[in-house]
Image (cartoon, grey):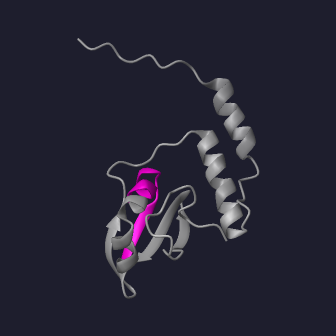
Amino acid sequence: MPSAFEGVQSADPHLSLPKTSYHNGSATIRIPEAEAARDLPALLAKVRAGAEIIIESGAVPAAILRSESPTRRTVSECIEIARKHEQESGEIPILDPDFAEDVADVIRNRKPWTPPVWE
């Protein structure tokens, strides 16, 4: 199983793999306090990439690291997240049967945004 830290260089080559889950396309990584202290730069890189990090003291959450503002993603970034999720978990994302048609409808009917004129 690939690491949740794939593509992020760790200062500690013995850092064990944290538990990773996904909610709304974002990774939630649970990691023990001692491991978080060993490689904070790698954790912050994951937060900047949109992950939420739960630092645990025993089985109890001690702190949560997440971005101050929500991550905005393009459709292609969402597709890539779905691919990575499938590779890491073995679970294939299931879309609504009408999803492709709905997206095509939105693209076909979109109009340029005309901001209101302020006085």
Residue 24, visible in the rendered structure: no
Q: Residue at x 39, y 18 (%)?
A: 115
Give residue 25's position: percent from left, percent from top: 56, 56
Answer above or below: position of 98 versus 24: above
Q: What is the span of residues highlighted in magenta in the rendered image? A: 44-55
Say which quadrant the C terminus sits in.
top left
- Tell me: 23 left or right of 64: right
Q: Is residue 51 magenta?
A: yes
In this rendered view, identify the residue nearer to me: 31 or 108.
31
Residue occupying the point 70% across, 62% down: 86
Taking the view exactly as shown, the residue that stands out farthest to the bottom is: 58
Q: Going by the picture, which residue comes out furthest to the left?
A: 119
Q: Which residue is at 66% across, 55% downward?
A: 82
**Residue 86 at least partly seen:** yes
Q: Is residue 104 above or below residue 18?
A: above
> Residue 7 lies in what quarter of the image?
bottom right
Horizontally, is 103 left or right of 112 in the view? Answer: right
Callout count = 0
Q: Position of residue 1 (x, y in %)?
A: 67, 71
Q: Position of residue 93 (x, y in %)?
A: 70, 59
Compared to 91, does 114 lie above or below?
Answer: above
Q: Name the residue rendered at 64%, 25% in the picture.
A: 109
Q: Quadrant of residue 31?
A: bottom left
Q: Is residue 31 magenta?
A: no
Q: Position of residue 34 (x, y in %)?
A: 36, 79
Q: Nearer the viewer, residue 22 or 47?
A: 47
